[in-house]
Image (tube, grey):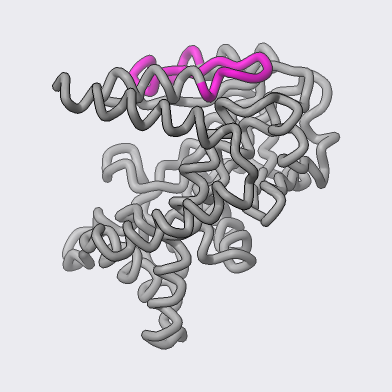
Amino acid sequence: MWFSRGLSHVGIAVMHVLGRLPLVWVRALGWLLGCLLYGLAVPRRRVARTNLRLCFPDKSLAEIRVLTFQTFVYFAQAWLDRGWLWHGAPEVVRQRLTLSGAVNELQGDAPVVIFAPHFVGLDAGWTALTQQLPRPFTTIYTNQANQVLDAWILAGRQRLGTTQLLGRDAGVKPVVTALRAGAPLYLLPDMNFGPKDSVFVPFYGVLAATVPSLSRFAKLGRAKVVPVVTRMTRRGYEVQVMPAWPDFPSQDIVADTTLMNLQLQSFIDTMPAQYFWVHKRFKDRPSGEPPVY
């Protein structure tokens, strides 16, 4: 345990140093780290390839391999970018995060659920919103087993702006209370959290266990749903706020969740290598279907 904590302290110290380096250097180091992870993290490489083959059956094996490699590079670069996101000068952070699109959807104090898919820039998107918009934001947080890393991540995500990270084990009530009080919820519902409380809806034509939390929180909080998609660029990140979805949520939670995945596909198609393909998105299968991993 002490050895693990010691390594964590060393890693955090490295991130402090990265926070002071030019972005081009950080990205170069991220490229090298991505190459290393691609070569060593064989199980996760297989997961990413399986996901990409299932979701893009028309792509050749060579194209899948390229996308898999790019996924690891973007993942590593985004991880090292947390050095400047969480430790860099605030003015540098603001300069590297471009907030665009229907930003007016997030102004005022109306209840908002932000649909923030798992692209590599999810922490950059959160930081851009909390730093650049004058209202409190909330998100749901899962505590890390490593207490040193847990404290570091919590501090980083609460560094700029007015924020509240609500523990997943605290339940729905504090999330809904914050929503109704005017704090937008930055929600990331596009992962496999197990079959409990999930519905099987298509994701690129493959049934995927998906939590219908986007629809549920929008109903409970009497909130509109606003997608926010973050793209890594050479200069940092572009954080695009999209118009609120009309007639969402509906009375059909399965239809709402199906629509969420369909919209997500349209976002992914614009930058497939920046999505979180290393996650076992299809781990749980409908009854009678074989495992895919």
Please give the count of numbered marks on the rendered protein: 0
Quarter the N terminus occupies: top left
Q: Position of residue 167 (x, y in %)?
A: 40, 18
Q: Residue at x 55, y 47 (%)?
A: 26
Q: Position of residue 132 (x, y in %)?
A: 77, 27
Quarter the C terminus occupies: bottom left
124 versus 42 height, above or below: above
Q: Residue at x 47, y 32 (%)?
A: 15
99 versus 144 height, above or below: below
Q: Nearer the viewer, residue 266 or 80?
A: 80
- Looking at the image, can residue 109 be seen? yes
Q: Nearer the viewer, residue 26 or 85?
A: 26
Q: Nearer the viewer, residue 191 or 165?
A: 165
- Looking at the image, can residue 215 be seen? no
Q: Nearer the viewer, residue 226 or 270?
A: 270
Q: Position of residue 193 (x, y in %)?
A: 32, 41
Q: Residue at x 63, y 31 (%)?
A: 127
Would you identify the image quadrant in which residue 49 lies? bottom left
Left or right of residue 288: residue 97: right
Residue 169 covered by magenta stretch:
yes
Residue 189 covered by magenta stretch:
no
Q: Residue at x 28, y 65 (%)?
A: 39
Left or right of residue 64: residue 99: right
Q: Which residues are magenta?
A: 156-174
99 versus 259 height, above or below: above
Q: Position of residue 212 (x, y in %)?
A: 46, 41
